[in-house]
């Protein structure tokens, strides 16, 4: 008939096996790890793709422009002293007349600037219409100076129609000027002027900027003109480094120059830009350094471009490809950190990356490169919320499945409630109550474990100790035992195997039993029971049976045979036989009692000099040795060799060894009783050496067992060496036998040394 199944275990096993399949992807640690990795890859791809897309378009141009403007204001610096603005301001209009001025006034202004030593002059004024005789005066002034650039304008609408052209000054003026340059301004999508094209190209033509023309006339090297066949309006615009708010450049009024009130030193060797700054005339533009609603007029923007070129402080934008690659690499680095670090460090990493990107962008701007940080910053700002959202979903699902599994698999009713306003709060409150219940269960299990009478451990499938009671910690003399390899602990105790009985170096007998836990997790409960007392009682019982059933029976039978033999009791021979058998019986009983005491009675240890022990034992047996013509020699002993032992038991053990040596020693020989201290090993050695037939180690081990006697004459009962070994092992020592220097037996007792009392 088949063996009936165990319902409890089957229920637990089936629940344990089905638990992972019911919990879904977050219940199984391996599936949860794979799911988390896949979600991380998906979030990473999404954020990296968004970052690259944003880096390659103008979607974040306003945000990047805001960063550029902030960095520009923080690191504006001082403008170059070489640049001078001659402003046609409100005062000039009031003194000279309303705008436009006569060409003769412009000619006079150019003459005065040239005579004052201006290195080059740029007229940010358009001379599109003729003015009769005054044009000749201006043309004459231009030719006389030879250092004046005039402005021209490129029509963007005509360029868009496929017929780009520039409208320059009228022929007499244009041919008399040292050069011409366009004054077109290009604003970004937010209306802020941040970059200006040094060249405009299209239709096979190329037009330099007025600032480029000015520097060319002044002898400054300029970038070469781009291919005139390029179909684009602004070729490689240069990002201008603005040096502060409006009015930052050195400025003089045109009226002061015309009256001759401007010192020559203010104009000499300067790059002069003449333009209109009066209210209501000319355009006004916002720049990165415009603050408080103050706008830049055109001539100041021209001056800023000239200053940028003179100082070689132009800012080149990092290409969109390089920006996208760097931003994507930073996001990959961030996502790797989010996968590894905990939420607190993840937030710190995200903030640190944002700060690092902004600082790097600012630093590169100081070096002349503009790295747009908005895409990387936005990617970092998206990465943490997206990944945290997926982690929150995973944690919520995990809590829900674990609570359901805990409620289903608990051995009894496991009560928990959902308290809170949202899903996470309710799950957290339920988990708190569940954890409280598990804590109570853990305290109960720990209390039961600590109350067990034997040393008990719980070992996992890897052989590591997970739980241990105080008795186990006392046994192994280590706290705590958690995390220790169980097999190594057994080896330290001297256990030859994982189960069964073994003896420790201290003489204790331990029984190891291992029970598998039915949970299927590989846990084992290990019990180490101290059975020393039980085994001593068992040996004593066996010894008593041996003594009563055999050894004491023989002399008593002999006495009874003498009494029943019909002889006369008063015969000397009969009386001697009865006395010998009676004395043998008494010796057996006495030896058995002494062995039992050595094995089980509580020791009464004291610290004393081992030399006194040796002398006492030798003195007590000197008469016997003298009667047998055996010399009992005790060489001079070292003083202060201290031992901690039961003096009575140890003295009797040494007497037994000397007595055995006297029994086997031939007449006329000697027995040496020596004391030696091994300071390195911390041991005390007591040695008894005779000149008898000697003993092999295996024979000596047999004689140390109870009721084992050596063949030969003599009244021994076979308990003497058993008593000696029991006494020595009770004191943590060792009893060994070897061959002496004179061919006899050398028996040695090794005991732990003790420090003398202070």
Image (cartoon, rainbow, N blue to C red):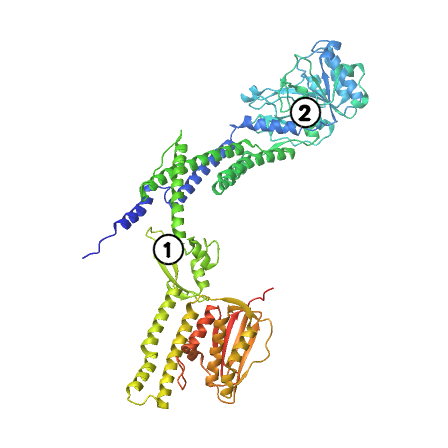
The disc placed on residue 4 is: none
Q: Where is residue 111 in the image (x, y as percent from the top left)?
A: 78, 18
Q: In this view, does 609 lie above or below 65?
A: below
**Between tags 1 and 2, which lies in front?**
1
Q: Residue 57, can we see it?
A: yes
Q: In this view, does 469 lie above or below 693?
A: above
Q: CA separation, marks 1 and 2?
A: 80 Å
Disc 2: which residue: 244
The disc placed on residue 525 is: 1
Question: Which is more toward the observer, 683 or 524?
Answer: 683
**Quadrant location of the N terminus?**
bottom left
Label 1 packing within 10 angstroms: few (<14), some (14-19), many (20+):
some
Q: Is residue 570 above or below residue 396?
A: below
Q: Position of residue 631 (x, y in %)?
A: 53, 86
Left or right placement of residue 475 versus residue 374 in this view: left
Residue shown at 57%/73% (left/top)? 677
Question: Which is more toward the observer, 756 or 648?
Answer: 648
**Quarter location, residue 88:** top right
Question: Which is more toward the observer, 508 or 465?
Answer: 508
Q: Position of residue 491 (x, y in %)?
A: 44, 63
Q: Which SS class for mark 1?
A: strand
Most distant residue in the left direction: 1
Q: Which SS class for mark 2?
A: loop
Most distant residue in the front direction: 570
Earlier-in-chain disc, 1 versus 2: 2
**Quarter location, residue 532:** bottom left
Q: Residue 322, can we see it?
A: no
């Amino acid at each position: 008939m088949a063996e009936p199944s165990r319902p409890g275990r089957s229920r637990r096993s089936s629940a344990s096996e089905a638990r992972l399949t019911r919990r879904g992807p977050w219940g199984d640690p391996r599936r949860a790890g794979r799911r988390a990795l896949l979600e991380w890859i998906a979030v990473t791809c999404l954020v990296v793709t968004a970052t690259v897309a944003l880096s390659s378009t103008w979607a974040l141009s306003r945000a990047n422009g805001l960063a550029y403007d902030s960095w520009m204001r923080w690191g504006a610096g001082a403008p170059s002293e070489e640049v001078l603005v001659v402003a046609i301001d409100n005062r000039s209009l009031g003194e000279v007349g309303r705008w436009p001025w006569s060409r003769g006034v412009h000619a006079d202004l150019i003459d005065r600037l040239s005579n004052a030593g201006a290195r080059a002059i740029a007229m940010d004024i358009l001379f599109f219409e003729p003015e009769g005789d005054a044009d000749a005066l201006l043309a004459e002034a231009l030719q006389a100076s030879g250092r004046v650039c005039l402005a021209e304008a490129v029509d963007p609408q005509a360029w868009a129609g496929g017929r780009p052209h520039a409208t320059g000054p009228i022929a007499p003026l244009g041919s008399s000027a040292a050069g011409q340059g366009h004054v077109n301004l290009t604003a970004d999508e937010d209306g802020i002027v941040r970059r200006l094209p040094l060249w405009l190209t299209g239709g096979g033509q190329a037009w330099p900027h007025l600032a480029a023309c000015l520097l060319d006339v002044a002898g400054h090297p300029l970038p070469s003109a781009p291919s005139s066949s390029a179909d684009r309006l602004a070729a490689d615009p240069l990002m201008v480094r603005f040096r502060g708010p409006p009015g930052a450049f050195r400025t003089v009024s045109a009226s002061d120059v015309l009256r001759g009130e401007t010192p020559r030193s203010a104009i000499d060797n300067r790059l002069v830009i003449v333009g209109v700054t009066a209210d209501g005339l000319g355009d006004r533009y916002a720049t990165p350094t415009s603050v408080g609603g103050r706008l830049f007029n055109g001539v100041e923007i021209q001056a800023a471009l000239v200053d940028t070129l003179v100082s070689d402080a132009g800012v080149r934008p990092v290409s969109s490809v390089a920006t996208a690659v760097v931003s994507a690499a930073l996001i990959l680095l961030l996502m790797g950190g989010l996968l590894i670090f905990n939420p607190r460090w993840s937030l710190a990493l995200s903030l640190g990356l944002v700060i690092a990107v902004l600082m790097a962008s600012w630093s590169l701007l100081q070096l002349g490169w503009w790295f747009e940080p908005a895409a990387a910053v936005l990617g970092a700002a998206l990465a943490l919320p997206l990944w945290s959202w997926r982690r929150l979903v995973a944690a919520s699902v995990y809590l829900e499945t674990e609570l359901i599994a805990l409620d289903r698999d608990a051995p009894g009713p496991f009560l928990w409630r959902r308290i809170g306003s949202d899903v996470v709060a309710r799950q957290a409150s339920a988990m708190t109550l569940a954890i409280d219940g598990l804590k109570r269960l853990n305290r109960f299990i720990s209390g039961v474990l600590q109350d067990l009478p034997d040393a008990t451990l719980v070992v996992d499938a890897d052989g590591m100790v997970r739980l241990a009671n105080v008795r186990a910690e006392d046994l192994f003399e280590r706290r705590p035992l958690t995390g220790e390899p169980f097999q190594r602990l057994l080896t330290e105790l001297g256990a030859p195997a994982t189960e069964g009985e073994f003896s420790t170096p201290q003489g204790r007998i331990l029984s190891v039993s291992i029970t598998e836990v039915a949970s299927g997790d590989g846990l084992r409960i290990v019990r180490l029971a101290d059975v020393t007392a039980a085994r001593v009682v068992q040996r004593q019982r066996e010894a008593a049976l041996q003594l009563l059933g055999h050894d004491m029976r023989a002399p008593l039978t002999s006495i009874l045979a003498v009494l029943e033999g019909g002889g006369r009791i008063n015969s000397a021979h009969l009386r001697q036989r009865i006395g010998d058998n009676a004395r043998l019986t008494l010796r057996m009983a006495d030896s058995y009692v002494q062995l039992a005491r050595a094995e089980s009675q509580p020791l009464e240890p004291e610290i004393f000099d081992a030399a006194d022990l040796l002398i006492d034992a030798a003195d007590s047996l000197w008469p016997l040795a003298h009667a047998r013509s055996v010399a009992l020699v005790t060489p001079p002993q070292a003083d202060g060799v201290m031992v901690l032992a039961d003096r009575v038991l140890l003295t009797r053990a040494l007497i037994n060894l000397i007595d055995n040596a006297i029994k086997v020693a031939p007449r006329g020989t000697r027995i040496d009783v020596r004391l030696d201290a091994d300071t390195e090993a911390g041991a005390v050695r007591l040695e008894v050496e005779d000149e008898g037939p000697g003993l092999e180690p295996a024979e000596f081990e047999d004689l140390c067992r109870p009721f084992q006697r050596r063949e030969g004459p003599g009244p021994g009962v076979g308990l003497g060496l058993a008593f000696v070994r029991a006494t020595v092992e009770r004191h943590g020592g060792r009893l060994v036998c070897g061959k002496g220097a004179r061919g006899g037996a050398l028996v040695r007792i090794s005991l732990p040394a003790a420090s003398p009392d202070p």
